[in-house]
Image (cartoon, rainbow, N blue to C red):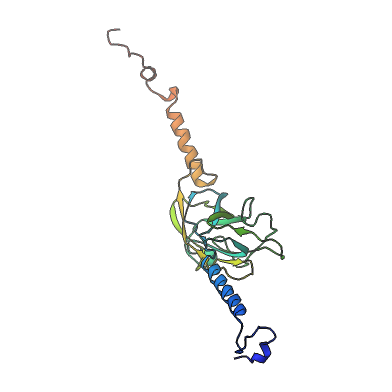
Amino acid sequence: MPDLAVVEGLVPMNRGGRPGWGWQLAMGCGVLGWLTAWEARAVLRLDPGEIVLHADRPGQVVTLFLENLGEVAESVRGIDLALESGDGGPGAGGSVMGPVLSGLELGDGSLFAGYAARRELDPASSGQQQFWTITVPGLGILPSVPARSRVPLVTLEWDTSGLWTGVFDFRLRGTGLGDTAVYDGFGFHSPGFDAGEGRLRLVPGTAVPEGGVGGWLWLALVLIVRWRRTPESDPLPERRAGARPPSIRE
């Protein structure tokens, strides 16, 4: 217990040598305010859900959203973003050939847009397993996620060239390079943050696949169908036009 003589000049004492009622009231209000702020803290969540991608197609852009389920806004200093498609693929020692990450952007309208945020990609990253560090430098105004809202975080560019079907795991935590984490305005881990797990589902594209064997097969099928429908290829053009075939008597 500290010597009362040491703190006597800082804490007003009553005649019994104890802190006065005013100091006790101030301390009580401070504790109550801290507990209230903790109860109403922000609860951030990054849940990719199921992402649908077209088969055998590069340059597909998908947006990830950061959601605040709490009752107060949360300032964000930065984020560690771990991304893993399938089991990481051969480039990370895995065996599943899945969709490849070909780009990450902080586009207009995203959380970090307009804050001169820095992006750094871990050198150990590969096409199916990446670890990005995004930070806002300086001591100025920080981006924030309002209470009960959802804001765009980043846009990812996917490449499914050579892949025609399948459902792949999409992990943000437990990856070979680490876990996703959000840093609050003081640079500490946001205590209420949670990262969900998603899936990448491939569906047949509506357009002709770009390049590859599949594109040539599709083009060959279209040419065969068109050739079979031309009048020159019809052995009975009269029937095709709806004309009455000549009778034997005629």
**Would residue 103 be seen by someone viewing this image from the given angle?**
yes
Residue 117, image quadrant: bottom right
- Give x and y (percent) for residue 73: 58, 60
Q: Quadrant of the C terminus?
A: top left
The answer, for residue 176, to whether it is visible in the render is no
Task: Classify residue 199 as left or right of residue 82.
Answer: left
Residue 198 place in picture, x, y as percent: 47, 59
**Measured from the top left, where is residue 232 in percent x and y?**
44, 23
Report the side of 111 relative to 172 (left or right).
right
Q: Is residue 229 left or right of residue 192?
A: left
Relative depth, front residue between 232 and 138? 138
Image quadrant holding the N terminus, namely bottom right
Numbered marks: total: 0
Whether residue 189 is situated above or below residue 102 in the rendered picture:
below
Q: Up-down: is 179 above or below 162?
A: below
Point out residue 247 in the picture as x, y percentages from the top left corner. 29, 11
